[in-house]
Amino acid sequence: MPTAGKLTAAFLFAALFGAVAQLALPAFAAAEQPEPRAFALVNMALGLVIGWRLGGARAGSNTWAGAVGQGITTTVAITFAALVLHGGIRMVALSMRKAYDGPAEAVIAVFGLMIDIGRTAALPEVIAALAAGAVVIGLVVEWIGRRAD
């Protein structure tokens, strides 16, 4: 059921992860790593979907501390999903070049690729933006959820 809290969470998390993707992109060139395909679009789509499903699910029913926790939880979930998805995309690209001996090796390689992408994107400004965004979005979604009822 669409609610104001879910809609707000979806759009705010999509915007946060789109902005954070733009902050992180120069780090891939500096590290001489290939830029993840459709990095900003994938992150925004994940922010939209997970923000709707997880971030806005309890809007208006939390305490203010619970709202901050909900924002942090949603941010961590989106970040993890983005790392898994980008690692999987890079693994498929490498497997098309026959970089792996078998499917098990390719699946195991996803975890190493996730770590590489995470290390490259873990700039101080990216982490600060995610932390501040999580708190602010959690509070805004809770406020919208309370006002919409």
Image: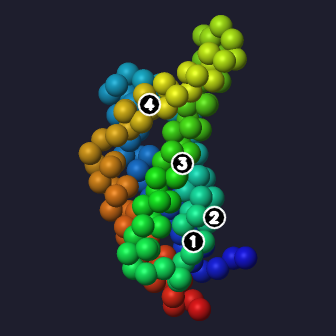
Disc 1 versus disc 3: nearer the observer: 1
Q: Which circle, 3 or 2, is nearer the viewer?
A: 2
x and y percent of residue 128 in the render? 29, 54
Q: Secondary structure at mark 3?
A: helix
Q: Which residue is mark 2?
A: 53
Mark 4 or mark 1: which comes first in sequence? 1
Q: Is residue 89 left or right of residue 135?
A: right
Labels 1 & 2 near each other (Cβ < 8 A):
yes
Residue at left offset 44%, top offset 46%: 21
Helix, strand or loop for disc 4: helix
- Provide residue 32's location: percent of width, then percent of height: 38, 22
Q: CA distance from mark 2 to mark 4?
A: 26 Å
Q: Callout 1, which amino acid? A: Gly
Residue drawn 57% across the image and 75% down it: 58
Label 1: how many Cα within 10 Å (few below 14, some 14–19, many 20+)? many
The CA distance from mark 4 to mark 3 is 17 Å
Pointer 3: what residue? 43
Residue 109 percent across, percent down from the top left: 56, 21
Work out whether residue 83 or residue 29 is closer to the camera in this orientation and state it. 83
Any mark on residue 56, and which? 1
- Against 86, residue 126 (above or below) is below
- Say if 74 sits above or below 80 in the image: below
Q: Which residue in the rendered view is the most extreme toward the right?
A: 1
Q: Are marks 4 and 1 in contact (CB under 8 Å)?
A: no
Q: Amino acid at mark 4?
A: Ile
Which circle's residue, 1 or 3, is located before the other in the chain? Answer: 3
